[in-house]
Amino acid sequence: SVSDPRAGYLKDLSRRLGIEKGEPKWYEMSVLIEELVTKAINKHCNVDFYSASLQYYMGIPGDLFTCVFAASRIAGWCAHILEQWANNKIIRPSSNYVGHEERPYVPIEERG
């Protein structure tokens, strides 16, 4: 795969913030994972890979990482929807769901 040039910027920012905060272990762990994955299966990280360490260094609680990720994507998702509407084309999935078809609803307070 081809390296995402945007990932390099976030990688450098993660390194600098890790040093600034005196806790570079999350950056270092990310670099190690990136190197191992690239070597093992020739897949390079995308722009989002270093976002977890960056959000940690910025003091964002871990349970909000996904929310921050989604918020950063909303404009692009909306743009895609508008493009699809403009073309009046139904978007069909390119794969079939193979998970459980019927599962009982479990109230959130009872979930594990």
Image: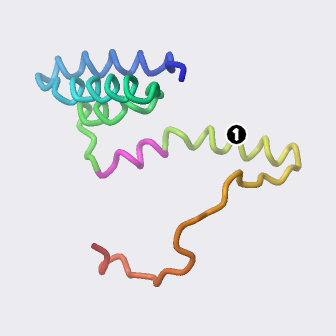
- Image quarter of the N terminus: top right
Question: Which of the 4 image quarters holds residue 96?
Answer: bottom right
Q: Is residue 83 magenta?
A: no
Q: As rendered, which of 23 and 35 lies closer to the eye?
A: 35
In this view, the residue farthest toward the left is: 22
**Mark 1 = which residue?**
79
**Residue in the image at 43% along x and 30% along y:** 41
Left/right placement of residue 90 relative to residue 22 reads right
- The relative height of residue 100 versus residue 58 in the rendered view (above or below) is below
Relative vertical location of residue 10 with respect to residue 37 in this rendering, above or below: above
Is 18 placed left or right of 52 in the picture?
left
Who's the residue at 46% across and 25% down the image?
A: 42
Give the answer, above or below, for where 56 lies relative to 8.
Answer: below
The amino acid marked with disc number 1 is Ala
Residue 21 image offset from top left, x and y in percent: 15, 24
* Left or right of 88 on screen, residue 43: left
Q: Nearer the viewer, residue 66 or 101?
A: 101
| Magenta stretch bounds | 63-70
Residue 76 lies, in percent from the top left, at 62, 38
In the rendered image, which quarter is residue 14 located in?
top left
How packed mark 1 is, by other alpha carbons closer than 10 Å (few <14, some 14-19, many 20 or more), is: few
Q: Position of residue 47 (x, y in %)?
A: 46, 27
The residue shown at (40%, 81%) is 106
Q: Residue at x 51, y 21 (%)?
A: 4
Residue 67 on the magenta span: yes
Residue 90 in the image: state x and y as whole percent.
Answer: 83, 54
Which quadrant is the C terminus positioned in? bottom left
Q: Is residue 56 above or below residue 45?
A: below
Total tally of numbered discs in the picture: 1
